Amino acid sequence: MSRWSRAQSRLDRALFGSDGLAQPATIADIPVSVIVNEGELVFDGAVQGNRRTVSLTKANALAAGVTPARGQVVKVPGESIESRIAVPPIAEHGLYILVLE
């Protein structure tokens, strides 16, 4: 494992671990830890407006056995969120970014 991969894994554990920013959630009734975001989304250089998103690591998704897909229901009890994934998941830098309806 390269130095960069180890550093990224430590950062993921810090953010998505029990002391991080992550919150318990379910995707398609499978428990995972996610970070809830709300802000501007940009696709192909065009601002799409304010949308709520959740982020989870690919490693967390793989360990939980979930593959996020458009239309799956995401529930985050701590944020009173129960919404479907609006567009196919955006995968970047070891994260899935899920845009909610």
Image: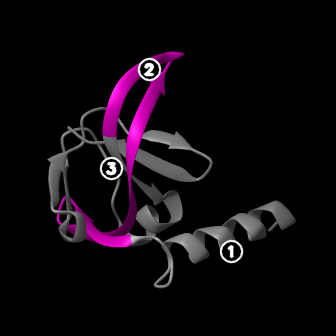
- Say the numbered circle drawn on residue 90: none
**Residue at the spot 41% in from the left edge and 62% down from the top edge:** 61
- Residue 71: % across, % down: 18, 40
- Residue 69: % across, % down: 29, 43
Query: Which amino acid, by three-letter code, is at mark 3?
Result: Pro
Asked if the magenta segment contains residue 24, the reply would be yes
**Residue at the spot 85% in from the left edge and 66% down from the top edge:** 3
In front here: 99 or 79?
79
**Residue at the spot 59% in from the left edge and 53% down from the top edge:** 94
Question: Label 2 neighbourhood size at 10 Å, few (<14), some (14-19), many (20+)?
Answer: few
Asked if the magenta segment contains residue 13, the reply would be no
Between discs 3 and 1, the one toward the N terminus: 1
Q: Which residue is mark 2?
A: 47
Question: Label 1 neighbourhood size at 10 Å, few (<14), some (14-19), many (20+)?
Answer: few
Which segment is the magenta one? Answer: 23-51
Q: Is residue 73 left or right of residue 43?
A: left
Q: Which residue is mark 1?
A: 10
Q: Is residue 7 placed above or below 99 in the rendered structure?
A: below
Q: CA distance from mark 3 to mark 1?
A: 23 Å
**Residue at the spot 40% in from the left edge and 39% down from the top edge:** 39
In front here: 20 or 67?
20
Q: CA distance from mark 2 to mark 3?
A: 23 Å
- Say the numbered circle drawn on residue 68: 3
Query: Which amino acid, by three-letter code, is at mark 2?
Result: Val
The answer to whether residue 71 is seen in the rendering is yes
